[in-house]
Image (tube, rainbow, N blue to C red):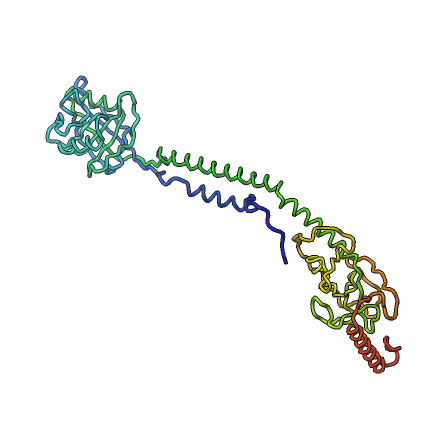
Amino acid sequence: MRRPAAAPGSWLRPRSQWLPLLVLVLSLLRPAAGARVEWFTAFVSTAYLDPDSNVTVTANSESGRYGDSSPKGSVQGVIGIPKNARDQLGCDANTEYFIPRSGEPWIALAARGNCTFKEKILNAAKKMAIAVVIYNFLGTGNTTVTMNHIGTRNVVAIMIGSTTGLEILELVRRGIPVIMSITVGSRHVEEWMSSQSVVFVIIAFITMMIISLAWLIFYYIQRFLYAGSPFSSQNKKNKNNRKETKKAIDKLQLHTVRHGDREIDLDIEGCAVCIEVYRSRDVVRILPCKHVFHRVCIDPWLLEHHTCPMCKLDVIKALGFMMDTCENVEVVIPESVPDNIPGGNANVSLQDGAEASMLPDSPTFESLQHDDRLTEEDEAVALIEANLENQINSDSSSCPIGCPDSR
């Protein structure tokens, strides 16, 4: 059974099941460089004795931020600043610090910039500082950022705003000891994505858009070319030819085989397609060449080949239907003949419910025989008729009175 050839580019037709695959591809393109940033604030408390009023001034605010590699612990000590007033950055490894109260635990205070956070922290730790406080750039107010200083060991490091840092720096320069206490504040979590990740997402999105656009252009070009190709016209031609073939087959005569049938010439070997002997109630089709076959056998054959299996007569053209016999048609197997057809019914039934024409009532039905049939075939037919008469006589003798077949 042959099927029509698939159209070129049919595999390119859009399908709804491709959408989950596209979503999966896009999900795999999500950057792995995105990260969750966790940081902690620091409560910064300061206290100093005002020399003018002899009053202790204190301040306490959650204005500091721990560095990412800093231990989240509490420390307390006196503030120390670099001795060189022109260099408050603490980037020099030999930086000396001014500590108003020597001998006490002290915390280094340095400005941001000119070197890494790690260098500032390690330089102060070499001078025995228990903690390092770095204030932000000038003009940034009290804003802070998370410092990156991997490798500073167990030195507590925080950042404070430039405003607070400059106030403390001025007090220490005047020689006023400032006691600072640092304690852990609240925890914060931020989702962020690096610039490299953003670039990766943009490139991946543009690439997917280009691939999708190229696929659509290629698909519609294939569709446009196929619309004017011989495949399209051939499919339409095959469909029309199949309809004409079915109409031609419907015009062929049908007949129901009965016991003692003398109306048609039944070949000795039976149906040439299925190689089965004709039985009572079998529905057969009579071709223009007078050859007889089972309807369920010859109909698919004619749809496929258009010719008689015995004499190769083009049945479709013989009925007056002109078409291309080289077509590729889809074979449709007709429904099998029901078994409840009455044995004595001599009416001829047509396919698709059409009424059948009656075969002429002739004892020998000579009009259905070929004029050029050989003598051997005549003898074979006579032998079949004799066998059928004997079978009928034997059935009639064995049937009781009132039997429908009794003569």
Report the front residue among 283 and 62. Answer: 283
Quadrant of the rendering where the C terminus is positioned: bottom right
Q: How many marks?
A: 0
Quadrant of the rendering where the N terminus is positioned: bottom right
Residue 143: quadrant of the picture: top left
Q: Is residue 71 left or right of residue 307?
A: left
Q: Is residue 234 left or right of residue 171?
A: right
Residue 280: quadrant of the picture: bottom right
Residue 88: quadrant of the picture: top left
Across and down, in percent, residue 121 comes to 19, 32
Please indicate, yes or no, whether residue 215 appears anywhere in the rendered image. Answer: yes
Q: Is residue 16 left or right of residue 138?
A: right
Across and down, in percent, residue 320 comes to 78, 53
Q: Is residue 95 above or below residue 28?
A: above
Report the front residue among 336 and 173. Answer: 336
Q: Is residue 344 left or right of residue 143?
A: right
Across and down, in percent, residue 80 comes to 16, 27
Please indicate, yes or no, whether residue 99 appears anywhere in the rendered image. Answer: no
In the image, farthest residue toward the left: 103
Across and down, in percent, residue 298 comes to 72, 62
Report the front residue among 41 and 237. Answer: 237
In the image, farthest residue toward the top: 52
Q: Is residue 176 above or below residue 127?
A: above
Report the front residue among 202 and 99. Answer: 202
Q: Is residue 367 above or below residue 49?
A: below
